[in-house]
Amino acid sequence: MVNFLGFNFTSLINLLIRTLSLSLKFIFVIFLGKYSVDETNLGIYGIFTSSISYSLYLVGFEYYIYVSRKITQKSSNPIEYYVKHQLVFYFINYIILFPIILYFLFGYDFISLSFLLIFIITLLCEHLGQEIFRLLSVFKRPLAANITLLIRSFWIIFSLVNFIFTEQIEMHLYFQLWAVSSFIALIVGGFFLTKNIEFKKIIKTKVDYREIKKGVKISFLFLISSLCTQTILLSGRFFLDYFDGKAIVGVYTFFSQFINVIEVIVYNLVVMMIFPHMLETAYKDKIKFTEYVVAFKKKTIIILVFCTIGLGFGMPYLVEFMDKPLADNNLISFYILLLAAIFYNISLMAHYILFSYGKDKIILYASLSAVILNLTLNYFLTESLGLLGIAISYLSAMLVILIIKVYYKARFNKNSYENIDIGKQK
């Protein structure tokens, strides 16, 4: 098996595919920033994508965590049993939450009403596609999972081709192409899943609403935690939109796309490849679990070093190429966001240890503390400092998450993975 800095060939192929998908998003952001009159189109794109991202957590409710644990722990019920209840729960959620989400986003004019139908279709296909991605990851098929993710990004290629021929930026068309790509990825992902799931069994499985209630109860803590984290990541765009308009949101969106590369690489090279094994060995083999933890830490640190150097030195040149004074004037905010991203990805080492042993309340406690601080600082700093205030708020929140998770992980280790009051495994 070919290895490079501890990463095997399969991991590198997965990274290559994921990098291609991420690169398309980078290219699209650079394209919008370079050829738009100002950063307004980037702002529209940032609000639209942020709304999709946040809504995915609301409608998904993190129910996949309950299903993933049941599958990896080899529950007595067949996989199709849990997938059937997962789908039924999502259908109920769509009926309840879609009207609320749409009222907030379109009623308060964060998104133009002309995007309404496109938003609904995109959200639906992106959510189901994401759940397929997660299932494929649980089945230890990261290659298939990343292929579906790449297909979801094909819309960018067609958008760029359209611009080459028309020399017109058409946000409506681009979002329509996004919806089509997500739908195709959904079909392809469903085909991949036929290797692990018998869809006929899903249809025949009877629904037990007590099972859904059980899944909701367990997933709820993770939902609150995830919503807190996403609020920290995305709320800055809405604060900036309210106080300063979509042009500065465009700059924040531009910086965020590159900051996000660190988490994407860590997720694909580390989390997807190692975490399923951590989950399996957490209660069965402490020695093996420790080996996976060491590998997790080592690979994460290597990635952080390379990404920090690359992004730190490369961003000034990219901003110069963009020739957008607003981005250049806010470059200090990029470096603050980069430091925050480093803190967050370091915290993942402690996060996944706590997660493997079911210390869910610790994770929730960290997220709640961070989001309260973040929203408070956003409120007081955005009007006076703009993007710099958002960056400081984000950095503060990520530091709080890091400190809390590392502290409780240390207590957890000290007590031999057993006797810790917060989040004690039942």
Image: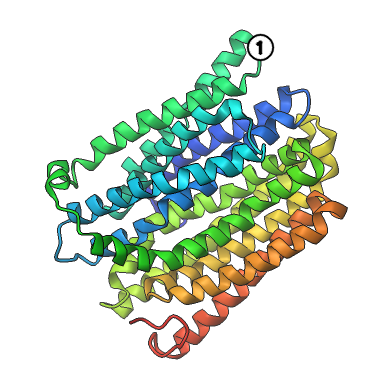
Query: With respect to residue 310, does 408 lie above or below?
Result: below
Q: Position of residue 328 (x, y in %)?
A: 83, 40
Residue at image location 36% in from the left, 60% down from the top: 65
**Above/below status of 101 relative to 405:** above
Quarter of the view holding residue 138: bottom left
Taking the image as shown, residue 196 lies to the left or right of residue 245, namely left
Specify whether residue 358 is in view: yes
**Residue under the image location 50 percent in, 28 percent down:** 118
Residue 74 rendering spot, x and y as whole percentages? 19, 65
Q: Is residue 299 above or below residue 174?
A: below
Q: Is 332 placed left or right of 167 in the picture?
A: right
What residue is shown at x 33% (from left), y 68% (from top)? 279
Q: Which residue matches tag 1?
A: 167
- Disc 1 secondary structure class: loop
Q: Position of residue 335 (x, y in %)?
A: 75, 53
Is the C terminus in the top left, top right, bottom left or bottom right quadrant? bottom left
Q: Residue at x 42, y 58 (%)?
A: 271
Quarter location, residue 164: top right
Residue 30: percent from the left, percent from the top? 67, 31
Say which of 103 and 68 sits in front: 103
Task: Compare residues 138 and 210 and report the one nearer the observer.
Answer: 210
Residue type for callout 1: Glu
The local crowd at label 1, few if under 14, some if 14 to 19, many if 20 or more residues have their Cα within 10 Å, is: few
Q: Is residue 177 left or right of residue 335?
A: left
